[in-house]
Every structure is written in structure tokens, then in C-alpha cells.
Amino acid sequence: MSRPLIGITSYFEAARWGDWVREAVLSPPSYAKAVGRAGGAPVLVPPLGPQAADDYVRGLKGIVLAGGVPVGADAYNGEPDPRAQEPQAQRDRSELALARAAVRADLPILAVARGMHVLNVAQGGTLIPWLPEVLDSDRHAEPGGAHTIQVSVSSKLGKAVGDRVEVNAPHHQSVRRLGTGLLAVAWAEDQIVEGVELQGHRFGVGVQWHPERGTDTRLFDAFIEAAR
């Protein structure tokens, strides 16, 4: 059986190889390895601009909206928070267009961390730019702070990972208002949304944590199965 071609969003950053330092298309290898382990063929999708979104979607069998810096507040008409990391506007524009094109085409989507926020904003939702202020606590931003997530068992996410999953995913940004067609399907104990799904979509799942980093392959397995 041939491996489905899976796009992974990436970013432009300065990188060093040999004696050179040049701008490069970068992606943490954990995404490509997770796609490969699950039976997909990973390819990087650079943030070249919105104009290529439909072409990418026509050539791919699935898309991973990968993690990274927070989505800029301009993308959802919000107020920027000076404590948040500087956004990457070009990446925001490219990935929002790619997410919308994938939704229109019913292309399987796995949206990870920032990727979940991109999917939400692409569907008209909004974000909390600085979660510790809303909660009056840094508990979601603490490195190494593992916590248990409750998952809807009737959702595609729940069918893949079960009704409870322990995650370690520090984040300062979070979903505020859900976008059109999205349902919350996973929550932290304080009811912060940790997972979303697109209603009526073949596979449109977003999670706040990083399933590509651990040893549990079930979510990537389900995603690649949908892409076949």
C-alpha cells in the first residue's frame, strides 16, 4: 500500500550548516518521524503565502498544522499582548489560507498546539492571547507540568486516545471563542479547551498538546488512516 503524502507546515528561520548561516525552511523532526511511523510520507510546506494553498491541498492527502509561535492578534481582530512572543505574520497568513483550503476540500487535518489556534481562527474563532492573566495563574505555562485532559468519548479524538490522556504542553495562548463548525472535545480540569473537532469533516482534529513528541502513536495512526 502506498504511503499518503502528508504536508507539515514549517517556518523560515536562520540556520547554520558548515560555515554558513542562512535562512532555511525548518520543522522539528518529531513531526516527520511521527507521520512516518504512522505510515505517511512527510513533506514540508513552507509559508510562501496564501496563493499556494489550494495547490498544496490538491497534491496532499492530509495536512499537519504544526506548533510554533503564537498566532498574531491581528489575525482575529484581537488586542495584542506585549507579553506574548512576537508573531510571524507571513506564517499566519499562509497557514490560515492553507487551513481554510483544507476545510473546503475535506482534507484530513491534524492541528497541533499553535496549529489548533490556526484552525480555530481560520474558522472565525478568537483566542486568549495571554492565558495566565485570565486564570490568574501560570499553571498552563509551566514547563514539565503534566496534567490530565478529559476527552469526549464520542469524538474522533476520544476514539483514538480514550476518555482521559495525560499531557505536558505549556502554553500562554488558548481558544476563547470557537470558530464556525468547531466543537470542543477535550478540556483541562479548569475547562480550558484542549481539543477541538470539525463537525462533518472527514478528520479535522486539533489538540493543545504535542502528540508527536511522545510514544503514544494512536492519534497519528488515526490521522494517517483517514488520509489513506
Image (spheres, helix red, strand yellow):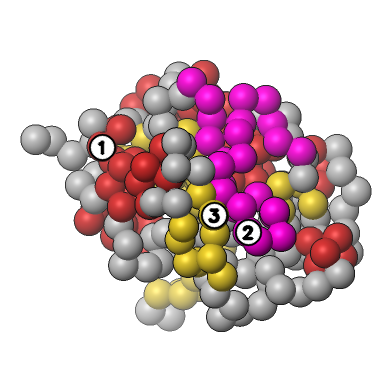
Whole-percent x, y for residue 113 in the image: 57, 55
SS label for mark 3:
strand
Disc 1: which residue: 225
Quadrant in which the N terminus appears: top left
**Mark 3 is on which residue type?**
Gln
Give the quarter of the figure containing the C terminus: top left
Comparing 187 with 142, the one in front is 187
Question: Which of the two marks, 3 or 1, is nearer to us in this view?
Answer: 3
Q: Is residue 199 visible?
A: yes
Gap in angstroms between the C-alphas marked 3 and 1: 24 Å
Q: Which residue matches tag 3?
A: 150
Residues under numbered marks 3 and 2 in contact, where contact means CB atoms less than 8 Å apart: yes
Give how far across and how far down residue 86 sits, in percent: 76, 61
Q: Where is residue 23 in the image (x, y as percent from the top left)?
A: 53, 62
Q: Which region shows up in magenta?
A: 177-200
- The residue carrying mark 2 is 188
